[in-house]
Image: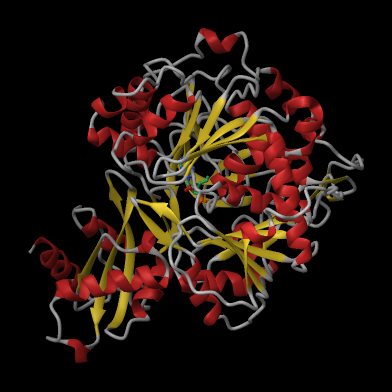
């Protein structure tokens, strides 16, 4: 159990009751908890009825074949219609859907009417390219409005999108395209990042050249970066040549609530990323419910900004589906926070009058280090609510976020959830909850969470245990693409002996005497770097795939800014001895990991060692390496096959 500094956390005594601006007028009131406690399924059915159903559902949940849930299964709806057409029909076509800001400083304002037209045109193009309901479409794009349009156009025709973050390498992209059997890739020539154009189409070209399955028939390319690209006439199609000229007449067809909506790959404890599958009605219900209630959304007046990339689940649920289902006005930003200068985010907030900001603790800690003068140079007085996601937010960063960004008065909602849960599961509600810095606090209405010991009994405070979701929820993953056994094994086997199916999240947690939940980090071989999930095993396989490496062990070491950082220990092949210095090897291998997986996976440090600490049965003891990487005294080494190895590694690191 990662104990971090839970003891000091639990002595955190600051409390922030809901401010007056929220108590009288917040979207969410305590009545939601009462209703959900009284009848959980009726509560979710009521939330689902906020959507437009072509055929109303009669059954809320079918849990007759756990862990395969079916929510609202006999109802039909169109996800894109819910995010677009119905707002236009309701008379809100002129409302701004997206204030888009390009990194170089260009910008676009897109209303709901315009977004609806563009999605209809794109849907017609997809159909003309032979895409049908159920087909998979890979999306590899920068943060430009066309990314949102592409996702919604795919959803509109009942196809399934798989968005791959633009920072992933050609190999990672190829693996995901092949695993899903994608027929089409939607990409851009390139996008702006850190003051330069990051090419994307060339990466798609090399991914497809290496594809083992060759399922892709077309590549649809948005012109953004204006970088030089190669063109395959028989395969590649420009977005502006097709979508701009296409008809904006497109009637959305209804699909079953359980129609697959998207696959999103995420790292697990093995080397192979898992394709997490989400479906339509339940997902949209919980994404929109949480977006409205956790963020206290007032669609007529709020300007919402979730800073996540659409390549991650946060971007799916709180850049695309939640905000658009709720008819929100939002900001979308293409680039990095410090381009051209570290104050960019705050300038954007001032420019668009952002009222709700949803960001990651890593970003907050980075700004904290740079100093308050930078945010204080912009007028942030429009902000009324702040959110945090992706990793635990330490009380110090929480207080800084509230004081410096939130003028010492905005509530902060710390939201716990996962790619697998699809939407927020644990969070304060701003008009109801008295906030405790550092704790994600309580399950949202309609969600059942438990913290269990290894033996499945509920742990009593102040002990820590394993976080489980003890009842099915609408936006739960429906499986792992193509691998139902892995789905059962990964999430549902840990507490299979208990009555009822318990979803094991992979996180450690602690419940305090008030019933508030404190997340303690992953208990498996999954790391959380800047709120992005990476697998130790996946990076180890990338390292050993390099010819100079004999063995590798990777750990996530505590890092002040990024939460955790990747630290690798490698043994070089004996033939390599003396051929390069440890520094050269380390540089070479960092680049290699970048090529194999993507820049986000590059280790912060790589140590060349002669031995790795192993048990007598040959299992690498990562916990000991983590001790060294975090500069702690080395823990219990009695199960090691060779107890001297840790001393040697630790001496080497100090040198
Ligand atoms: C893992 C899920 C949720 C979208 C972004 C990450 C960690 C997430 C919190 C939080 C503490 C958090 C957990 C979880 N996590 N939010 N508020 N407090 N930890 O999605 O890549 O699927 O990662 O992120 O460890 O299991 P993901």
Q: Which of the two residues, 246 or 8, is positioned nearer the viewer here?
A: 246
Q: Is there any visible trace of residue 555 in the rendered image?
A: yes
Q: Quadrant of residue 452?
A: top right
Q: Residue farthest to the bottom? A: 575
Tell me which colouring the rendered structure shows. secondary structure
Q: Quadrant of residue 556?
A: bottom left
Quadrant the C terminus occupies: bottom left
Q: Quadrant of residue 82?
A: top right
Q: Is residue 569 left or right of residue 509?
A: left
Q: Which of the two residues, 629 or 79, is positioned nearer the viewer here?
A: 79
Rendered view: 637 above or below 35 = below
Q: Position of residue 271 (x, y in %)?
A: 48, 71
Q: Is there any visible trace of residue 613 in the rendered image?
A: no
Residue at image location 40% in from the left, 75% down from the top: 541
Q: How many marks?
A: 0
Q: Which of the two residues, 145 or 434, is positioned nearer the viewer here?
A: 145
Q: Position of residue 266 (x, y in %)?
A: 53, 59
Q: Position of residue 146 (x, y in %)?
A: 60, 50
Q: Is residue 93 left or right of residue 97?
A: right
Q: Which of the two residues, 179 or 107, is positioned nearer the viewer here?
A: 107
Q: Is residue 221 left or right of residue 585?
A: right
Rendered view: 444 above or below 524 = above
Rendered view: 169 above or below 532 = below
Residue at image location 80% in from the left, 64% down from the top: 132
Q: Position of residue 316 (x, y in %)?
A: 60, 47
């Amino acid at each position: 159990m990662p104990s971090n500094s839970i003891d000091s956390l639990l002595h955190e005594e600051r409390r922030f009751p809901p401010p007056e601006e929220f108590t009288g007028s917040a979207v969410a009131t305590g009545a939601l908890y009462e209703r959900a406690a009284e009848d959980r399924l009726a509560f979710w059915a009521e939330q689902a009825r906020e959507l437009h159903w072509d055929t109303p559902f009669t059954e809320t949940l079918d849990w007759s074949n756990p862990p395969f849930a079916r929510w609202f299964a006999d109802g039909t709806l169109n996800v894109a219609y819910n995010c677009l057409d119905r707002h236009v029909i309701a008379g809100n076509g002129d409302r701004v859907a997206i204030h888009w800001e390009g990194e170089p400083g260009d910008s676009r304002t897109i209303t709901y009417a315009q977004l609806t037209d563009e999605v209809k045109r794109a849907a017609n193009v997809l159909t003309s390219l032979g895409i049908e309901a159920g087909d998979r479409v890979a999306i590899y794009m920068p943060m430009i409005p066309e990314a949102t349009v592409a996702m919604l156009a795919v959803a509109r025709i009942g196809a399934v999108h798989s968005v791959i973050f633009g920072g992933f390498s050609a190999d990672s992209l190829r693996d995901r395209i092949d695993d899903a059997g994608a027929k089409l890739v939607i990409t851009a020539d390139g996008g702006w990042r850190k003051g330069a154009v990051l090419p994307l189409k060339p990466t798609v070209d090399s991914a497809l050249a290496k594809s083992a399955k060759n399922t892709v028939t077309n590549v649809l390319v948005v012109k953004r970066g204006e970088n030089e690209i190669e063109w395959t006439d028989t395969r590649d199609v420009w977005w502006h040549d097709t979508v701009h000229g296409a008809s904006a007449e497109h009637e959305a067809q209804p699909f079953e609530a359980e129609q697959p909506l998207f696959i999103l790959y995420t790292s697990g404890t093995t080397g192979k990323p898992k394709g997490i599958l989400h479906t339509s009605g339940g997902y949209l219900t919980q994404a929109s419910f949480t977006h409205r209630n956790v963020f206290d959304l007032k669609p007529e007046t709020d300007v919402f900004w979730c800073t996540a990339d659409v390549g991650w689940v946060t971007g799916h649920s709180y850049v695309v589906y939640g905000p658009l289902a709720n008819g929100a006005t939002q900001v979308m930003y293409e680039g990095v926070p410090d381009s051209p200068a570290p104050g960019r985010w705050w300038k954007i907030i001032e420019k668009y009058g952002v009222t709700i900001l949803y960001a990651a603790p890593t970003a907050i800690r980075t700004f904290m280090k740079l100093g308050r003068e930078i945010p204080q140079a912009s007028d942030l007085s429009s902000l009324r609510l702040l959110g945090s996601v992706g990793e635990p937010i330490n009380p110090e960063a929480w207080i800084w976020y509230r004081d410096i960004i939130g003028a010492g008065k905005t509530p902060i909602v710390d939201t716990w959830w996962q790619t697998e849960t699809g939407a927020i599961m644990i969070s304060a509600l701003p008009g109801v909850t008295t906030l405790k810095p550092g704790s994600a606090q309580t399950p949202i209405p309609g969600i059942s969470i438990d913290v269990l010991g290894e033996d499945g009994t509920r742990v009593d405070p102040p002990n820590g245990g394993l976080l489980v979701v003890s009842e099915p929820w609408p936006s739960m993953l429906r499986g792992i693409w193509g691998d139902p056994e892995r789905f059962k094994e990964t999430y549902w086997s840990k507490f299979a002996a208990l009555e009822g199916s318990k979803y094991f999240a992979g996180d450690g947690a602690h419940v305090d005497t008030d019933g508030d939940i404190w997340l303690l980090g992953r208990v498996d071989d999954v790391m959380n770097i800047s709120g992005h999930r990476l697998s130790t095993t996946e990076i180890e396989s990338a390292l050993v795939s390099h010819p100079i490496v004999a063995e590798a062990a990777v750990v996530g070491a505590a890092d002040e800014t990024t939460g955790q950082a990747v630290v690798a220990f490698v043994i070089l092949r004996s033939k390599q001895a003396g051929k390069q210095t440890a520094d050269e090897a380390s540089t070479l291998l960092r680049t290699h990991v970048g090529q194999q997986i993507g820049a986000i996976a590059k280790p912060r440090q790589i140590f060349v060692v002669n031995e790795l600490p192993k048990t007598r049965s040959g299992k690498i003891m990562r916990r000991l390496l983590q001790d060294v990487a975090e500069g702690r005294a080395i823990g219990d080494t009695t199960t090691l096959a060779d107890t001297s190895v840790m001393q040697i590694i630790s001496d080497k690191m100090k040198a």
